[in-house]
Image (tube, rainbow, N blue to C red):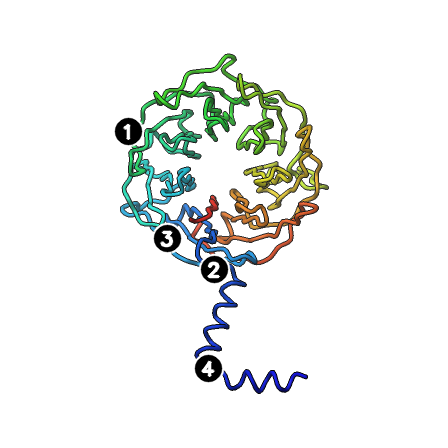
Amino acid sequence: MLRPTRRIASKAPRAAIATTLFAALTLISGVHAGMAETFAYVGNADSNDISVFKMTESGEMIPVQTAAFKGVDKPGSSTPLAITPDHRVLIAGVRSQPYLAVSFAIDPKTGQLSPIGSGPLADSMANIAVDRSGKFLFSASYGGNKVALNPLLANGVAGDPKQVIPTGLNAHAFLPSPDNRFAFATNLGSDQVLAFAFDATAGTLTPSDPPAHKVPEKSGPRHFVFHPNGKFVYLIHELNGDVAAFTYEARSGAWDEIQRTTALPEGFNGKGSDKKPWAADIHITPDGRFLYASERTTNTLTAYKVDAASGKLTTIGSVPTEKQPRGFHIDPTGRYLAAVGELSDSMTVYAIDQGSGALAKLKSYPTGKKPNWVEFLNLP
């Protein structure tokens, strides 16, 4: 039965066969017009650049570009990144003097970066974030014990700081609430989270009432993430490895702790000066079903299942990852996680099991030197 089919096919013009085959492959690979493509951006502190990758449907990372910071010679301690809500501009924080927010235009087709310009930051900023309107840049200074607010010009370049606010010790993250009405700043050395009312029209921050939420002494609140439903917030503590869950009251901006668990893998004993907890980053899947945290002393990623009704966490387990995993992120589909190692100069991609949330290692890729930050973006 198969022979006649083969003979008929062999008579068809080769060009027609090639065209049909190309069309079929294009359809299968999902590269037809209008299909969103996923890109990953990695901030590299010691090489003062950004590694750009294109991610395929299978989670494969294809190197696209290395975008360098023009005129920046000295390495900073980290390279925080932020992307504007319209996906047109990526901003990188430079932590060597002069302290700058460097803006790059994102090509909507290729994902490549082109320098636009730079604006001044108020200090060496460990964390930057764009507000929900895309008009302001939040930043937090660990060494300078302050947070700041810069306006973003129409082209995405930061203007001079509009507000610089002293904080407790070691401001580490400064992010807007889901509705953009509040902004919160962790103070790692003072064990508190500062709360501000944010007026996005006027571009002003004012302390909330109460102005701070205290956390346990010597816990070191570092990074936090809101649940996609806006009802919960999760906070990782650098110094004791705790992960705390809070209910979030959108009207008042109040946090109320409901649970405290750990990012430390099972069996961690903490003995010895080099064995102290050193937790780093935290992210949640876009559907809010799974949460992940990184820990640098053990070089691990810990996964949690999120209860949709209560917001509470159930630990799934830990997996080994890159050496000193200061930063990681989850792709917009919630199917993959990419973690970078400051001491391994590479990035590992994991598949997220859609049923259990467990991580399965796929492959590792070289990055620039001392990578610490990952941002994902779907284009167009």
Task: Kindly identify the amino acid type of the residue bearing the numbered disc 3.
Answer: Gln
In space, the residues marked 1 and 4 are separated at their CA atoms by 62 Å
In space, the residues marked 2 and 4 are separated at their CA atoms by 23 Å
Q: Residue under circle 1?
A: 160
The reply, left or right, for residue 299 in relation to residue 134 is right
Circle nearer the N terminus (3, 1): 3
The reply, left or right, for residue 122 in relation to residue 22 is left
Circle nearer the N terminus (4, 3): 4
Q: Residue under circle 2?
A: 31
Measuring from the top left, give residue 199's x and y in whole percent.
40, 20
Question: Label 1 near label 3: C-beta < 8 Å?
Answer: no
Closer to us: 14 or 85: 14
Residue count near mark 4 (Cα–Cα under 10 Å), binned few <14, some 14–19, many ≥20: few
Q: Residue under circle 4?
A: 14
Task: Kindly identify the amino acid type of the residue bearing the numbered disc 1.
Answer: Asp
User: Compared to 260, does 303 lie above or below?
Assistant: below
At x 71% / y 36%, what residue is drawn?
314
